Image (tube, coloured by chain):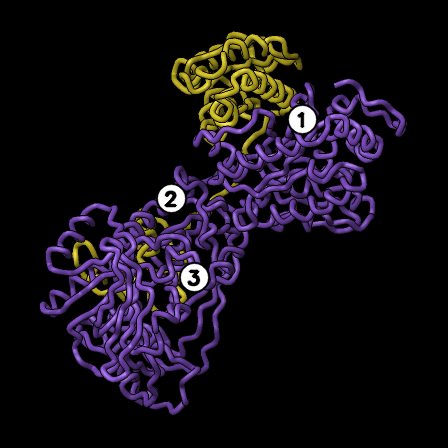
Chain colours: A purple, B yellow
């Protein structure tokens, strides 16, 4: 901490919050608000005479409410920076601090929030985690029973810098306890709350047990666990040391904790799974190893930086194995428990890893961006012709498009991430995405449906999730029928409804549109744009007479290989259950309407070539050519 | 590289040892590929991602004037950068190379239906050939870089990142919403497994 404060290249902006982030890799503009301390940083000597003089005491959050603080204070004695701040929610403005501060003249009640506009080339998100609130598990009695505490409260109570100067006491009577139960997996590995393993709780529980045993050698300590997880270097040895010290480990998750109202001792009821017996232990104190959970403001940070979140709610990395500290937004990196529960060694390592990844950008004068971006054909854009449109603006998750009636829509290349949502939303074919053009998609589609299309499942996949899911089905060797044919685009937002219609026009039996789950979308809201579009398409297909079961929309993550295989298998079963003649008839009947709609595609030499069989004067009577 | 508008597509079918070759005959896919419009040569290779495979592609681009390349092998998520670099080295714009996945999305999931897997591989190659017919060379977009960094969150991970960046000479803003840095770590007593102080 002190190293950071003393480093000439580190500028600490404490008591500050990021309000807004604009820009792109190499060129971010960040608006930061410095909250007023009502203390002039340069004048504050950190001696704390102001706090001594302050008459107001409130619970100290740093001490988990186990000690008081003053209305003017620092969180703890070793705080960096050591600058006092006035808590205006509790200050009574008696000005005794002003008197105590004296000639230093550091107190300033007129301070206002200060807005800073900072320019940076890359950003590392290391916003940490929150602790699970155990009051939502009433059977553990946290709250009503004073001697049931959380692991973090225990940290403060056995800490020599804590409120009891390292002496463990029972909150009910201030006595030193002679027995303690530590309960693992409180709020984690629990289908009711969080499915994931919090990772570091086994180790901190063992650590606290060892510390307590060293402080109070005759103390009986029992750890109730589901599994003890000690996978890092030196951790298993640490666990063995705890066992050798006489700390008892019981394999069982307590079902209930009750209290003796007179002694305030606690009864922990659990099944010892090794013995297959239900046990009841009487202990003087219980500590709950609460899960690490995503920060309450994760959603807000995610939206300002266009990050996505894992199903657990923590920030999602670009690739779980190959790019574990990159976020989906270029130039933004993840470090520490913000990405998932992590202990100190892992957090430090990830911090260094993120720094190296960020430095990779910052060490060069320029940066190259993949050119798969969207471009507007100004001659075709109806806005340029004076029509109010702007559908592309609404489809862009990055605010990269501006559209003023009378002028063609403008795309800021460096802001465009290449999802293709605007391309598919533009009803006039005025926008093209390089490397994923309409012609390139239709060319693939026509080849994949050249032979016996009615026996096939045509699958549109997004690069990040469902294509990854299909890959995962492969690496896991989950077999599925060889009827599927895939087309990859970057995002489900790029999947034009007309691609689906064109597939039926070319005789497809089944069509699958697949993409990321909403929280996983690599283009923030791309999936939502697609979801809305395909809801509309469902209704349109119904009007066209295409059986609804012949079109399916599925959100499949890169981890869901099993789901991808299952979806294709099910779609094949559906396909088998529909008579072939019916499929052919439905496609035949829908053809004329689809062809009228697809006339818009005949606006480039490539598309005219690809859609050569599509005649402007197509009538409903036209025969379907033999496939 | 391209001297005329004539398409000169090279198709490369990877055997990936037995991962692909154990289910379908890559030679048969290559043979089929030669019948596709614009394809001037098609080859199979035991490991296209290996040095001999990469060299063969680069050599063909130079000697046969290939202006499009189709790689039928594994996932783009696995080896697209490898093959892009390979064709670029031989002077071809990397966006004129297209991969199609006949491993994860074919032989690994249809190993019990080898005939159907072979048929699918051929159709996937046809589709990739059709796509490269319409691809254009693209140039990366170059943007300037502001030589400063921001770390949001002053806990142990953020401090570690900020110090490393600063040591590399990069001006680093360390933004912390609380009054002081240190985060959760600062609240902890001694830390495992070495039992040293957290601050």
Q: Position of residue A368 (x, y in %)?
A: 50, 36
Cα separation between marks 3 and 2: 26 Å
Q: Position of residue A480 (x, y in %)?
A: 53, 29
Q: Nearer the viewer, residue A74 or A600?
A: A600
Q: Is residue B189 visible?
A: yes
Q: Secondary structure at mark 2?
A: helix
Q: Which residue carries the number 3 mark?
A: A295
**Earlier residue among tags 3 and 1:** 3
Q: Residue at x 50, y 55 (%)?
A: A302
Q: Which residue carries the number 2 mark?
A: A359
Judge left or right: residue B93 versus residue A436. left
Q: Categorize mark 1 by other alpha carbons within 10 Å: few (<14), some (14-19), many (20+).
A: many
**Earlier residue among tags 3 and 2:** 3
Same chain letter for marks 1 and 2: yes
For the N terminus of chain A, the quadrant is bottom left
Q: Position of residue A464 (x, y in %)?
A: 52, 39
Q: Residue at x 48, y 14 (%)?
A: B57
Q: Secondary structure at mark 1?
A: helix
Q: Which residue carries the number 1 mark?
A: A445
Q: Kindly identify which chain the residue marked by label 3 belongs to.
A: A
Query: Looking at the picture, does residue A520 appear above or below residue B120?
Result: below
**Earlier residue among tags 1 and 2:** 2
Q: Categorize mark 3 by other alpha carbons within 10 Å: few (<14), some (14-19), many (20+).
A: some
Q: Nearer the viewer, mark 1 or mark 2?
A: 1
């Amino acid at each position: 901490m002190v190293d950071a404060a003393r480093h000439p290249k580190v500028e600490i902006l404490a008591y500050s919050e990021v309000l807004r982030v604009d820009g792109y890799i190499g060129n971010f503009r960040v608006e930061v608000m410095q909250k007023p301390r009502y203390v002039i940083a340069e004048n504050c000597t950190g001696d704390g005479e102001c706090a001594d003089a302050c008459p107001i005491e409130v619970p100290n959050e740093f001490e988990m409410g186990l000690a008081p603080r003053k209305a003017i204070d620092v969180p703890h004695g070793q705080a960096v920076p050591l600058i006092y701040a006035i808590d205006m929610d509790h200050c009574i403005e008696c000005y005794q601090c002003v008197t105590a501060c004296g000639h230093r003249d550091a107190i300033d009640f007129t301070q206002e929030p200060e807005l800073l506009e900072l320019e940076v080339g890359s950003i590392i998100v290391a916003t940490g985690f929150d602790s699970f609130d155990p009051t939502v598990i009433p059977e553990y009695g946290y709250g009503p029973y004073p001697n049931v505490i959380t692991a973090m409260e225990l940290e403060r109570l056995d800490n020599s810098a804590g409120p009891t100067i390292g002496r463990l006491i029972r909150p009910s009577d201030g006595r030193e306890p002679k027995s303690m139960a530590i309960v693992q997996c409180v709020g984690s590995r629990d289908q009711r709350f969080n499915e994931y393993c919090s990772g570091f709780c086994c180790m901190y529980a063992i650590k606290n047990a060892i510390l307590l045993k060293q402080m109070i050698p005759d103390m009986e300590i029992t750890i109730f666990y589901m599994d003890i997880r000690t996978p890092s270097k030196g951790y298993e040895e640490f666990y063995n040391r705890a066992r050798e010290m006489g700390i008892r480990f019981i394999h069982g998750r307590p079902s209930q904790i009750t209290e003796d109202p007179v002694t305030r001792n606690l009864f922990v009821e659990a099944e010892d799974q090794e013995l297959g017996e239900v046990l009841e232990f009487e202990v003087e104190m219980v500590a709950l190893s609460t899960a690490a959970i995503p920060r309450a403001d994760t959603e807000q940070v995610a939206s300002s930086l266009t990050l996505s979140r894992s199903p657990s709610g923590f920030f999602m990395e670009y690739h779980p194995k190959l790019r574990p500290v990159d976020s989906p937004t270029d130039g933004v990196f993840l470090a520490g428990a913000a990405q998932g529960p992590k202990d100190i060694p892992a957090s430090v390592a990830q911090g260094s890893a993120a720094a190296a990844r960020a430095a990779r950008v910052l060490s060069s004068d320029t940066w190259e961006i993949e050119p798969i971006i969207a471009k507007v054909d100004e001659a075709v854009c109806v806005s340029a012709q004076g029509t109010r449109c702007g559908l592309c603006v609404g489809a862009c998750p990055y605010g990269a498009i501006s559209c003023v009636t009378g002028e063609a829509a403008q795309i800021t290349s460096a802001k465009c991430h290449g999802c293709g949502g605007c391309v598919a939303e533009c009803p006039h074919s005025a926008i093209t995405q390089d490397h994923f053009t309409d012609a390139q998609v239709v060319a693939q589609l026509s080849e994949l449906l050249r032979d016996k299309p009615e026996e096939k499942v045509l699958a549109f996949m997004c690069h990040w999730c469902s294509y990854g899911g299909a890959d995962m089905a492969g690496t896991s060797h989950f077999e599925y029928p060889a009827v599927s044919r895939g087309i990859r685009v970057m995002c489900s937002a790029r999947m034009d409804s007309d691609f689906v219609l064109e597939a039926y026009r070319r005789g497809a039996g089944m069509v699958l549109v697949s993409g990321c789950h909403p929280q996983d979308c690599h283009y923030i809201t791309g999936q939502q744009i697609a979801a809305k579009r395909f809801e509309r398409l469902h209704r349109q297909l119904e009007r066209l007479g295409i059986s609804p079961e012949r079109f399916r929309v599925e959100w499949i993550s890169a981890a869901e290989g099993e789901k991808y295989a299952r979806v294709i298998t099910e779609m094949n079963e559906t396909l088998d259950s529909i008579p072939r003649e019916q499929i052919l008839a439905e496609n035949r009947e829908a053809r004329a309407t689809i062809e009228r709609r697809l006339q818009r595609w005949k606006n480039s030499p490539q598309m005219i070539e690809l859609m050569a069989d599509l005649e402007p004067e197509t009538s409903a009577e036209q025969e379907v050519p033999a496939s | 590289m391209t001297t005329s508008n004539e398409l000169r597509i090279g198709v490369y079918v990877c055997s990936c040892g037995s991962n692909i070759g154990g289910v379908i005959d890559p030679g048969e896919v290559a043979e089929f590929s030669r019948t596709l419009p614009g394809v001037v040569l098609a080859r199979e290779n035991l490991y296209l991602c290996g040095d001999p495979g990469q060299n063969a592609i680069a050599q063909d681009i130079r000697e046969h004037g290939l202006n499009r390349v189709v790689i039928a092998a594994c996932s783009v998520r696995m080896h697209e950068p490898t093959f892009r670099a390979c064709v670029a080295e031989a002077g071809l714009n990397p966006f004129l190379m297209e991969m199609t996945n006949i491993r994860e999305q074919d032989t690994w999931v249809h190993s019990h239906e080898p005939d159907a897997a072979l048929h699918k591989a051929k159709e996937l190659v046809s589709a990739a050939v059709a796509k490269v017919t319409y691809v254009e060379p693209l140039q990366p977009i170059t943007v300037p870089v502001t030589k400063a960094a921001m770390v949001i969150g002053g806990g142990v991970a953020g401090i570690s990142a900020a110090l490393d960046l600063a040591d590399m000479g990069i001006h680093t803003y360390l933004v912390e919403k609380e009054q002081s840095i240190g985060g959760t770590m600062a609240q902890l007593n001694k830390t495992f497994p070495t039992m040293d102080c957290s601050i």
